[in-house]
Image (cartoon, rainbow, N blue to C red):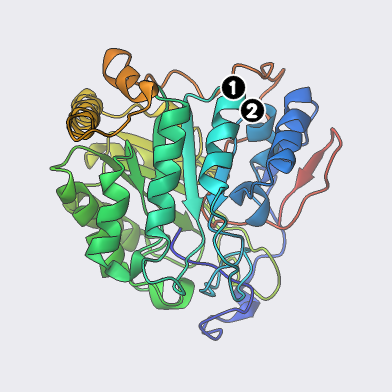
Amino acid sequence: MSGCGANRGPRMLMDPGLHRDKKPDWIRVRLPNNPAFWSTKSLITDLKLVTVCEEAQCPNRWECWGQGTATFMIAGERCTRACGFCAVKTARPEALEKDEPERVAEATKRMNLNHIVITAVARDDLKDGGAEHFQRTIEAVRISNPKIIIEVLVPDFNDKDWALEMVMEARPHIFNHNIETVERLTPLVRSRAKYGRSLTVLKKAKDMVDGKVATKSGLMLGLGEREEEIFQAMDDLREHGVTVLTMGQYLRPTAMHLPVVEYITPERFEELRQIALTKGFRHVASGPLVRSSYHAADFHPEDDVLEAIESDLVERAESRVEQGEEVAQSVWHVASDPPVAISCQGGDFPPGEEDLGAVVSDSPHRAEPLVEQGEEFTSLA
């Protein structure tokens, strides 16, 4: 997540009259009728956790929570940036909660997750941008559930290498940072973020671990980008080592946000998916309601990535033991019983009876709030 906010910025440079008020039939989502939805909601409330699913008004949270999955947003719900597309509020952030990493870890254990996505607001108020908090959360989750695949969706940390290194030292399996839009529209859409800086962050993260991490990024469409600009963004991501791509429809959270210029058809999203695959992406999720963590567990990191991370963790554990430190027994399980990304379904939750439309979100491609319960179809903003 590159940043977000309620006080829109930069100032509107796009004609609000471009906004398409009438939403097409394919922008729909089924409301929850699965007990697992309410179980997930109750657990999140019980552990006092924040999810980007709620904060960013994700259209897919009905399905995800109905499958017992959620994307955890650490470091608070107040962002220091004010991007023109994002529903997460901009305000002075509160202090970090020291026990939050352990609470997230407890949630993954209770939900018996095989794949977790951890994201955060931009915390430009912190010297490290929240990097240490990411590191502690990754480590806590791994101790609690050593078999889990860990995906992080991070801000750019203002391109501070030492902060990025803190995250990569914790060895996430998937490193996600969204460019969000094409280069021309970045100054309008992403406030303080920079297109080139985001590409650099993705490449640096991979280089810091000798390529042994899967890197991922996402695009919102419908903001007025041109076809050739989409293709160029794909090429730029590939040139910076990115192998996983998500593409989804931008949905306007409120009238104060950037207008929707175009609704992309499902057929066009599929065409773009095929083009991205021909450009060398290993995995592409593309569709109107796709978000950064759309069916996140459908992608399995490369075997050499998993092996390298397992080996590194064991070496570190051995080194710590040699120095007289105590090491949690669960750390040793990583090597003997490596992570397996089979499904994002939580073992403690019953499977859903029907597909609710799309899955997990953690990226700021937003829709207006939906009602809290019911079984009818409803269209989104």
Residue 63's place in the image compared with 336, above or below, is below
> Neighbour class for label 2 at 10 Å: few (<14), some, many (≥20)?
many
How many badges with numbers are in the image? 2
* Circles 2 and 1: CB atoms closer than 8 Å: yes
Q: Is residue 379 left or right of residue 139?
A: right
Please indicate whether residue 228 sits to the left or right of residue 124 in the image: left
- Which residue does the numbered mark 1 point to in the structure image? 346
Residue at image location 46% in from the left, 25% down from the top: 145
* Label 1 residue SS: loop
- Residue 153 in view in this figure: no
Label 2 vs 1, first from the N-terminus? 2
Q: Residues within 10 Å of mark 1 (few under 14, many from 20)?
A: many
Residue occupied by mark 2 = 68
Can you see residue 54?
yes
Image quarter hosting the C terminus = bottom right
**What is the quadrant of residue 19 in the picture?**
bottom right
**Where on the picture, by quarter, is residue 277?**
top left
Residue 206 or 258: which is nearer the viewer? Answer: 206
> Would you place residue 292 above or below residue 307 in this image?
below
Of residues 131 and 65, the one nearer the viewer is 131
Residue shown at 69% from the left, 46% from the top: 48
Residue type, mark 1 in image? Gly
User: What element does badge 2 sit on?
Assistant: loop
Alpha carbon separation for disc pair 2 and 1? 5 Å
Q: Which mark is residue 89?
A: none
Q: Residue at x 22, y 30 (%)?
A: 305
Residue 375: x and y, percent? 84, 32
Q: On the picture, is 61 further left or further right than 163? A: right
Q: Position of residue 269 (x, y in %)?
A: 46, 44
